[in-house]
Amino acid sequence: MQETSTTKQAPIKLTDGAITQLQRLFEEKQVPEGHGLRVGIKGGGCSGFTYVLGFDEKTDKDEEYDINGITVYMEASHGLYLVGIEIDWLDGLNNRGFVFNNPNAKDTCGCGTSFSA
């Protein structure tokens, strides 16, 4: 008998640097049990949409993914704009923070936190 999996493949990617930083933040911020990483979008920003990245509980609208031990929650409707996105962590002299590499973005703002699709 062949075993089947009900786990969906995550539509986003977290780099090793992002995973390391997120694991550190989970511990440092003492994120409560049952919370995961929320990845999403909201209207606004200078280009039309702003990225959402934070710790949150799962809602009825969410799809749940496991990415290298990180529980990720994302509203199914946001997948259209976020499929294929890579979230990275930069720790350099000029930039420090999470970076969104979105192949669906037609235009992005200078700070990299908003985009249009």
Image (cartoon, rainbow, N blue to C red):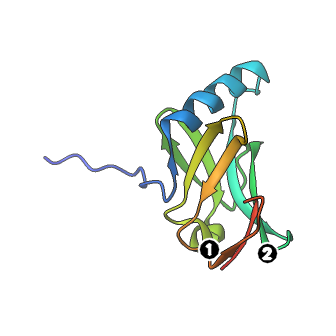
Q: Quadrant of residue 37?
A: top right
Residue 13, percent from left and from top = 49, 50
Residue sitting at x 27%, y 50%: 4
Q: Closer to the camera, 91 or 5?
A: 91
Quadrant placement of the C terminus: bottom right
Q: Secondary structure at mark 1?
A: loop
Which residue is label 1 attached to?
Answer: 105
Real-space Cα distance between discs 2 and 1? Answer: 10 Å
Verify CB contact (< 8 Å) between mark 2 and mark 1. yes
Amino acid type indicated by mark 1: Ala
Q: Closer to the camera, 8 or 92?
A: 92
Residue sitting at x 62%, y 40%: 89
Residue 22, percent from left and from top = 64, 32
- 71 relative to 83, above or below: above
Report crowding for label 1: few under 14, some 14 to 19, many 20 or more residues within 10 A (C-alpha).
Answer: some
49 vs 71, left or right, is: right
Q: Secondary structure at mark 2?
A: loop
Amino acid type indicated by mark 2: Ser
Which residue is label 2 attached to?
Answer: 47
Residue sitting at x 63%, y 30%: 21
Report crowding for label 2: few under 14, some 14 to 19, many 20 or more residues within 10 A (C-alpha).
Answer: some
Residue 80, percent from left and from top = 58, 74
